[in-house]
Image (tube, rainbow, N blue to C red):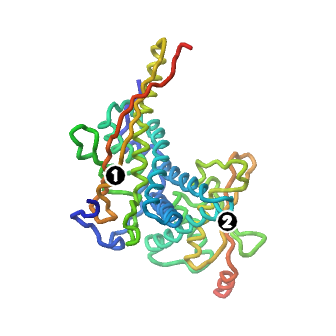
Amino acid sequence: MIGVGKAKQYTNVLDKPLSRGRQEVSLSAFAFLFSELVQYNQTQVDSITELERRLEDAGYAVGARVLELLCHREKGNRRETRLLGILSFIHSTVWKVLFGKVADSLEKGTEHEDEYMISEKELLVNRFISVPKDMGAFNCGTFVAGIVKGVLDNAGFPAVVTAHSVPIEGQQRARTTILIKFAAEVLHREARLG
Amino acid sequence: MPPAPKSGDALFASVDRVNAELFTLTYGAIVRQLLTDLEEVEEVNKQLDQMGYNIGTRLVDEFLAKSNVSRCVDFKETADVIAKLGFKMFLGVTATVTNWDAEGTSCSLVLEDNPLVDFVELPDTCQGLQYCNLLSGVIRGGIGNVILSNVVLKLFQNAYSQLPETLTVNMVSMKTEVTWVRDMLRGDDAYEMRVKLIKQIPEEYPYKDDD
């Protein structure tokens, strides 16, 4: 009968010791899982914007948890309060833990004060994804944009985060840029903090 | 001569790897989405199993290509190979095969470590949820096709060396049933799946070489 094991390990999952974060699974296992996620969501929606929103929501949940996990494990329970601090946290720590490398670049937008961009030549999640022409500008990087949004929102930096494909000369696959647009209150707070 | 099959650790070292936590959290996001959409835990279980089945049918091709496993003549060997090499190659953990029944058609796969369930606790409202049902679907999809693919590979090897007049391919298709016996999220000490072979149907493949 399921559930009547003799040796109960821990009554509460919060009592279990936190793993060191070194465990790995194969890339293809993740790729298959991600493809099932996208395929399932495709059956549930009628439009591309809805598909993007659902992927973003899925990523949001991941981001929220990643923030808690990493703050506790890597940063000794200290959370960033400055804009540049949280951005470099995402660009280095979060990217390093989730994707095995730091993001390719972090730039400040030239046109607007509240825009920042994280670029990646080839997002891990997009490695085995090909988007058919009739889906236009859809990019599965919206999942990663959701992760970033989850981290930012829960760290107290509300923002609108989107993923864009930027075709590059001489490269077959487009580069992906995650565009972060912070809410006005974040900039006011940042200005007040000096 | 086909190259010798690799050991589980060598296999895992040879594939590209990602952080297990990304995998765990993504799976959690999937289960949460399903629960929100479908609301009934039974429906979610079925959907997870179906997703696992889809993954399993494609996973097995990659497994055969990378692991150089040349021959799995019966169910016993298949189960061993899946537990030692298959699980190791994709999830980085090994499973053990136990409790064979008398006819050799039913066995248990036991997992102590399961990357799908890190950080997970089942709330009271979801007690009927088989959180790891994706895994049972993967096993179902994988086993049903591993012997199939093996036989096809062998036949093509034979075909090119012997060039017979007619070539009829006997494919064996296996159907399995996978049920959960122990589940750590419910308080047990390990994860145990009971894998039962339902039938082996030899199918005549209508392929003649001399047309």
Q: Percent x, y for residue A168?
A: 73, 51
Farthest bottom residue in view: A192
- Is residue B204 shown left or right of residue A89? left
The secondary element bearing badge 1 is classed as: strand
Residue picked out by circle 1: B179
Q: Is residue B27 visible?
A: yes
Q: Is residue B29 visible?
A: no
Question: What is the chain letter for disc 2?
Answer: A
Q: Percent x, y for residue A7?
A: 22, 64
- Around disc 1, counting alpha carbons within 10 Å, would you say few (fewer than 14), some (14 to 19), or many (20 or more)? some
Residue picked out by circle 2: A162
Both marks 2 and 1 on one chain? no
Nearer the observer, B99 or A187: B99
- Is residue A188 shown left or right of residue B100? right
**Quadrant the N terminus of chain B occupies:** top left
Nearer the observer, A70 or B179: B179
Q: Is residue B108 above or below residue A15?
A: above
Q: Is residue B121 above or below residue B158?
A: below
- Around disc 2, counting alpha carbons within 10 Å, would you say few (fewer than 14), some (14 to 19), or many (20 or more)? many
